[in-house]
Every structure is written in structure tokens, then in C-alpha cells.
């Protein structure tokens, strides 16, 4: 037996965002969810959907204070979105809950479809952003900066000097997080709400749709590398 020419290396503690979307597991959602998620891999499709429905997106995301996006939510801001979504997983759970919007709360039980999406910071893309400002920053240094930024409070972040490594990485991460929000809520959740509206009286409407995010997820990837 010949020895393998490949080995593995751990890339540890990469920062990311883990999100779960909880939807009723109904037959009319299955194909729709698959198509919506698959189409979401095409960034041009996502941008087109956001731009064509920009008013609905702004209304849906009003509680996010969309105006905080640098320059506001405009076609040009949407066009600047970078790829952040690379796949998803689905699993099923039993849910027992008390609906909060009903005049007389009652207990409900249903099958729930959970869509889990992992977003990972791209250190290589961050290095390119730094290079455009004339800064050559090793990968490990970028990871340290990201780690420090996650631990900083808002006052510390606001006081960062301009054109430094930390301020450039901070702006990159802010834009990246907004790209994630626009994908999750402006694209995915808006599509779900629109689907429910189209189905109309033929289905029991969902009182609530939950999106749960873990903004300080740490991802360790075990990647194959050429044998040394």
C-alpha cells in the first residue's frame, strides 16, 4: 500500500456567525426552502432580489435601523455585497410553545424545520482589503486583530485611529455583518414572508418566525494539505 500524499492541519478559532431559522415543517415549504437556499448561492440572484424589493426590505428590517448602513440601504450598497453564504444544513425538532400574539394564549405543538447557516470570516479577503491600503498583514496577525475587535467595547471601536490595521479590519467586519443581515432578512426571510402571503387563506399563517444568531461563534476547520 502506498502512503498518502495528503495530511491534515487544524485551522483553529476562526471567528464566525452561526444562525438558525425556525420554520413550521409543512409540505408547502419544502421545495420552496430548497429553491430559495440554492438560489441564495448565486450572489447576483440575491442582489437582484434585494434591489427589486428594496422598499419591502427596508420595511422588514426597520428595527435594525437600516439607516446605520454607511450611505443607507441603496442599490449601490447592495451591489457591494460580497459572498458570505456557502451552504446550509437542515434538521427537524418538536416544538411546544405559547404563541405570544394571540389574545388568549394557548399551547401549540408542531414539527419545526431548522435551517442552520454558518458564516465564516475570510482572512484572505481581509488581507486583500489591507493591501489596498498599503498594508501587508500576516494571516495570524489578522486573526489576532479580529479577536481583539470582538472583545472591544463600542467606545474603543469608535476611537480607533483611521487607516490603521484595526480600523480597516473593523470596517470590513461591519460591512460583512451587514451583508449577512441583508442575506438573512432582506433575502431569505422576506422570501419566506412573501411565500406565506401568496399562499394566503390556504394555510394557517405562522404567528412568528424565529431567527437565532450566535455572533461570536468560533470555527475550527480540519483541512487537507499536501504532505510535507
Image (spheres, rainbow, N blue to C red):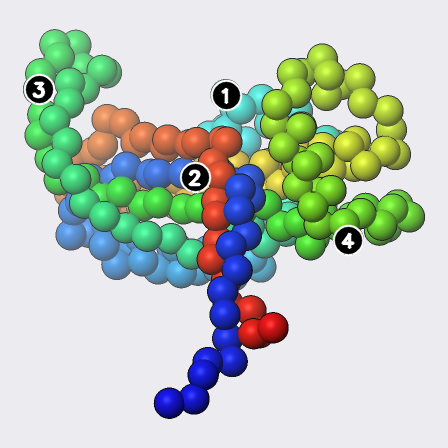
In the rendered image, residue 150, in percent from the top left (x then y), is placed at: 61, 27
In the rendered image, residue 62, in percent from the top left (x then y), is placed at: 52, 24
Disc 1 crowd, CA 10 A, few/some/many (<14, 14-19, 20+): few
Q: Secondary structure at mark 1?
A: helix
Please tell me which residue lies in front, 5 or 180: 5
**Residue 171 in view (yes/no):** no
Q: Which circle's residue, 1 or 3, is located before the other in the chain? A: 1
Residues at marks 3 and 2, CA–CA distance in whole angstroms = 29 Å
Residues at marks 4 and 3, CA–CA distance in whole angstroms = 52 Å
Residues at marks 1 and 2, CA–CA distance in whole angstroms = 21 Å
**Label 4, on which residue?**
128
Q: In terms of image quadrants, where is residue 178?
A: top right
In the image, what residue occupies the spot 22% across and 32% down?
206
In the image, what residue occupies the spot 73% across and 16% down?
156
Q: Which circle's residue, 4 or 2, is located before the other in the chain? A: 2
Disc 2 crowd, CA 10 A, few/some/many (<14, 14-19, 20+): some
**Label 1, on which residue?**
63
State left or right for residue 35 relative to residue 9. left
Image quadrant occupied by the N terminus: bottom left
**Label 3, on which residue?**
107
Q: Which circle's residue, 4 or 3, is located before the other in the chain? A: 3
Q: In terms of image quadrants, where is residue 97?
A: top left
Residues at marks 4 and 2, CA–CA distance in whole angstroms = 24 Å
- In this rendering, the answer to whether 51 lies above or below 95 is below
Residues marked 4 and 3 touching at CB (< 8 Å): no
**Label 2, on which residue?**
18
In the rendered image, residue 182, in percent from the top left (x then y), is placed at: 54, 40
**Residue 138 in view (yes/no):** yes
Number of marks: 4
Disc 4 crowd, CA 10 A, few/some/many (<14, 14-19, 20+): some
Disc 3 crowd, CA 10 A, few/some/many (<14, 14-19, 20+): few
Amino acid at each position: 500500500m502506498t502512503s498518502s500524499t495528503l495530511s491534515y492541519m487544524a485551522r483553529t478559532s476562526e471567528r464566525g456567525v452561526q444562525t438558525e431559522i425556525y420554520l413550521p415543517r409543512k409540505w408547502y415549504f419544502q421545495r420552496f426552502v430548497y429553491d430559495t437556499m440554492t438560489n441564495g448561492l448565486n450572489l447576483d440572484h440575491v442582489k437582484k432580489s434585494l434591489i427589486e424589493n428594496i422598499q419591502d426590505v427596508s420595511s422588514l428590517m426597520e428595527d435594525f435601523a437600516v439607516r446605520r448602513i454607511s450611505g443607507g440601504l441603496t442599490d449601490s450598497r447592495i451591489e457591494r455585497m460580497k459572498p458570505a453564504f456557502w451552504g446550509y444544513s437542515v434538521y427537524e425538532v418538536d416544538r411546544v410553545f405559547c404563541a405570544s400574539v394571540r389574545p388568549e394564549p394557548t399551547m401549540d405543538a408542531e414539527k419545526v424545520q431548522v435551517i442552520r447557516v454558518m458564516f465564516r470570516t475570510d482572512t484572505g479577503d481581509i488581507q486583500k482589503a489591507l493591501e489596498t491600503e498599503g498594508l501587508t498583514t500576516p494571516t495570524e496577525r489578522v486573526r489576532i486583530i479580529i479577536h481583539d475587535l470582538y472583545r472591544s467595547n463600542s467606545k474603543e471601536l469608535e476611537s480607533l485611529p483611521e487607516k490603521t490595521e484595526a480600523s480597516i479590519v473593523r470596517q470590513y467586519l461591519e460591512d460583512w455583518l451587514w451583508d449577512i443581515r441583508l442575506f438573512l432578512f432582506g433575502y431569505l426571510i422576506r422570501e419566506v414572508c412573501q411565500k406565506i402571503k401568496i399562499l394566503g387563506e390556504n394555510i394557517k399563517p405562522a404567528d412568528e418566525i424565529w431567527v437565532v444568531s450566535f455572533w461570536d461563534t468560533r470555527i475550527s476547520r480540519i483541512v487537507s494539505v499536501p504532505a510535507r
